[in-house]
């Protein structure tokens, strides 16, 4: 299946790592201490190691946090640093001699305080709150050991903490990494409330390699074309197929820049064919109503990936209690599997039927929660929805922290215990957006609205 992505749609998440030389670039560049810049340069040269204090130094310069917000975020960063260890950033930072290593999640613009926006601070507050509220839970030491040992465990552990935090709010006791079956087997969580109990296996999916390559290509081309449009006051209209080699891509973009300059001078429309296929029209004037450029995104068999993981996790989580599977899909999965105008309810109904059929092969699996990663930049999640579907399923579209939202699908088996637990899971994710304020209140911290600066509406020119 193919799907196009254009700059006017929500952008691909997780692709925007910090630049190789991560010198902070806050809004007020004059406030950056020269010693701080020298420390970053030394890290890039491999002559020094990154510390938590340096990583979080921009919190004190934040224009998005209130004074109370700066204190709260600083306290949560301290909690994260204490849990992960003082050397955690240094061991995994892709700089100097270690530049070829996998990107460090906390150096992405979703987590690094240098990106001085509220959603970054909300993430840090959530993580710190979960660590503090769950610190007495059995198995937290095992979770910490996994996080310290393997960078690849970061996303997986975040998902465990997310489920544990939501369950704790609803009064469930939380155990991480409990043993199941024989002594050598473990599952991700055990949740207990009164006489009810459930085991949980979690899994986060990354984009397949084909989609990742195409999205990276799309982003590079789109940014280049937007730059040419702005500079020459022209508009690109059409679709570009992926698969242009790097050297040919650079040459083609240079050619497009020259063609755009010709269009701007002459006022004539030029049509050209990208090297990989497609059609691109260059029109004078910027912007042109109804025009726009997009690139085609290919992807693999996502359904097969889900069913394969379902079978593997079902076997791994066999124990004395019903098993729930919590799968976290990237937002691109939900966007790429169907046309952009495909009704959400129909998509969720199709997924629910397929998942119910798969779950029928495992008597010990009570259900599955399939959720998208929180995404932003769309009006789809402007109104939260909760719909009960045929086949023991619940469809949810809920705000996490504005402007982020996610859609979830909860599918349960036909027995009474599974149906009761399905209601629990549905409630957890339907109210996820209020979890942070609940957690902050438990920790004696003001609500998020008092920690971040209000966003001022744009001024309207009355003249």
Image: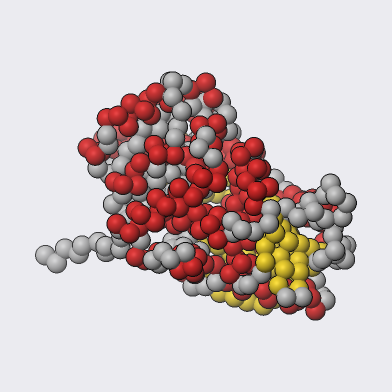
Residue 99, how many percent across, how many down? 52, 26
Q: Position of residue 176 (x, y in %)?
A: 69, 55
- Position of 257 relative to 137 (above/below): above
Residue at the image position 36 percent from the left and 28 percent from the top = 39
Tell how many labels.
0
Residue nearest the viewer, comparing 217 with 12: 12
Q: Is residue 137 visible?
A: yes
Q: Which of 389/262 is in front? A: 389
Q: Which residue is located at x 49 percent, y 44 percent?
A: 81
Left or right, residue 59 beside residue 211: left
Q: Residue at x 49, y 73 (%)?
A: 383
Determine whether 148 is above or below 248 in the image.
below
Q: Quadrant of residue 181?
A: bottom right
Image point 36% across, 32% down: which residue? 23
Q: Tell me: 355 left or right of 426.
A: right
Left or right of 363? Residue 81 is: left
- Vertical order, 25 against 77 (above or below): above
Q: Position of residue 112 (x, y in %)?
A: 43, 44
């Amino acid at each position: 299946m193919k799907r196009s992505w254009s700059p006017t749609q929500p952008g691909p998440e997780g692709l925007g790592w910090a630049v190789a030389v991560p010198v902070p670039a806050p809004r007020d560049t004059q406030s950056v201490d020269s010693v701080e810049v020298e420390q970053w340069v030394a890290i890039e040269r491999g002559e020094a190691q990154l510390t938590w204090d340096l990583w979080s130094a921009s919190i004190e310069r934040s224009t998005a946090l209130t004074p109370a917000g700066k204190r709260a975020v600083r306290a949560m960063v301290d909690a994260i640093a204490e849990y992960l260890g003082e050397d955690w950033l240094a061991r995994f930072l892709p700089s100097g001699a270690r530049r070829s290593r996998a990107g460090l999640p906390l150096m992405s613009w979703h987590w690094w305080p240098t990106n001085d926006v509220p959603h970054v601070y909300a993430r840090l507050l959530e993580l710190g709150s979960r660590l503090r509220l769950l610190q007495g839970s059995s198995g937290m030491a095992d979770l910490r050991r996994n996080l310290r040992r393997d960078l690849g465990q970061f996303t997986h552990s975040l998902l465990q903490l997310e489920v544990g935090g939501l369950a704790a709010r609803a009064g469930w006791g939380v155990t991480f990494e409990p043993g199941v079956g024989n002594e050598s087997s473990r599952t991700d969580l055990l949740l207990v409330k009164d006489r009810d109990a459930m085991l949980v296996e979690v899994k986060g999916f990354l984009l397949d390699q084909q989609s990742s390559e195409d999205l990276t290509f799309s982003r590079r081309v789109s940014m280049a074309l937007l730059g040419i449009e702005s500079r020459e006051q022209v508009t690109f209209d059409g679709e570009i197929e992926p698969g242009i080699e790097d050297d040919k891509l650079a040459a083609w973009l240079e050619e497009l820049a020259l063609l755009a300059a010709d269009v701007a001078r002459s006022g004539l429309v030029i049509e050209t064919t990208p090297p990989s296929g497609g059609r691109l029209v260059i029109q004078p004037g910027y912007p042109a109503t109804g025009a726009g450029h997009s690139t085609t995104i290919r992807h693999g068999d996502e359904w097969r990936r889900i069913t394969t993981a379902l079978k593997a996790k079902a076997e791994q989580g066999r124990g004395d209690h019903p098993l729930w599977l919590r799968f976290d899909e990237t937002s691109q999965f939900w966007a790429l599997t169907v046309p952009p105008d495909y009704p959400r309810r129909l998509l969720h109904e199709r997924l629910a039927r397929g998942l119910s059929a798969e779950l029928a092969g495992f008597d010990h699996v009570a259900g599955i929660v399939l959720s998208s990663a929180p995404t932003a930049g769309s009006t789809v999640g402007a109104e939260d929805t909760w719909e009960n579907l045929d086949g023991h399923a619940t469809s949810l579209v809920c705000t996490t922290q504005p402007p982020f939202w996610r859609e979830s699908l909860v599918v349960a088996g036909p027995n009474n215990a599974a149906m009761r637990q399905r209601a629990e899971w549905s409630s957890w994710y339907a109210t996820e957006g209020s979890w942070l304020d609940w957690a902050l209140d438990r920790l004696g911290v003001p609500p998020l609205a008092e920690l971040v600066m209000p966003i001022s509406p744009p001024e309207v020119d009355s003249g």
